Image (cartoon, rainbow, N blue to C red):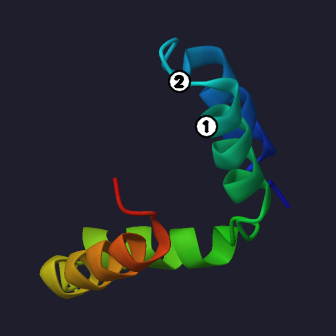
Amino acid sequence: MPTNRGQLESFESCADSQATPIELADWKAMIRQMPEVRIEKVQAVRAALQSNQYDEQLYLDRAIDAISRDLPAF
């Protein structure tokens, strides 16, 4: 099953050159702690989107709330 390692490599290759080494290390540590991608969930969401049975706004609001709780304040 794919993990977020590919995302980590992409992040490293396009990281903002103005970020400090400590900031980059913090972001890498956060990415490494992310759970694996659950392909079956992704496929289920894609199918629901294609059949217009997915409440995008509800899940978008939930995702934004979760992300805002997880990210440090800037």
Q: Quadrant of the N terminus?
A: bottom right
Give the crowd class for mark 1: few <14, some 14-19, many >=20 residues within 10 Å.
few
Q: Residue at x 69, y 65 (%)?
A: 37
Element carrying mark 1: helix
Q: Amino acid at mark 2?
A: Ala
Q: Is residue 5 positioned above or below 45 on the image?
A: above
Element carrying mark 2: loop
Q: Is residue 60 left or right of residue 70?
A: left
Which quadrant of the view contains residue 6?
top right
Q: Residue at x 74, y 29 (%)?
A: 9
The number of numbered discs placed on residues in the rendered structure image is 2
Residue wearing tag 2:
19
Residue 13 image position (x, y, % from top left)? 65, 16
Q: Is residue 52 visible?
A: no
- Judged from this view, the residue extending furthest toward the top is 17
Which quadrant of the view contains residue 36?
bottom right
Q: Residue at x 55, y 18 (%)?
A: 14
Q: Is residue 62 positioned above or below 56 on the image?
A: below
In this rendered view, identify the residue nearer to me: 21 or 50. Answer: 21
Q: Residue at x 65, y 76 (%)?
A: 40
In this rendered view, identify the residue nearer to me: 55 or 70. Answer: 70
Q: Is residue 23 positioned above or below 66 on the image?
A: above
Q: Amino acid at mark 1?
A: Glu
Residue 10 image position (x, y, % from top left)? 64, 27
Q: Is residue 48 left or right of residue 34?
A: left
Residue 23, which numbered label?
1
Q: Is residue 58 left or right of residue 47?
A: left
In this rendered view, identify the residue nearer to me: 4 or 56. Answer: 4
Residue 69 image position (x, y, % from top left)? 40, 79
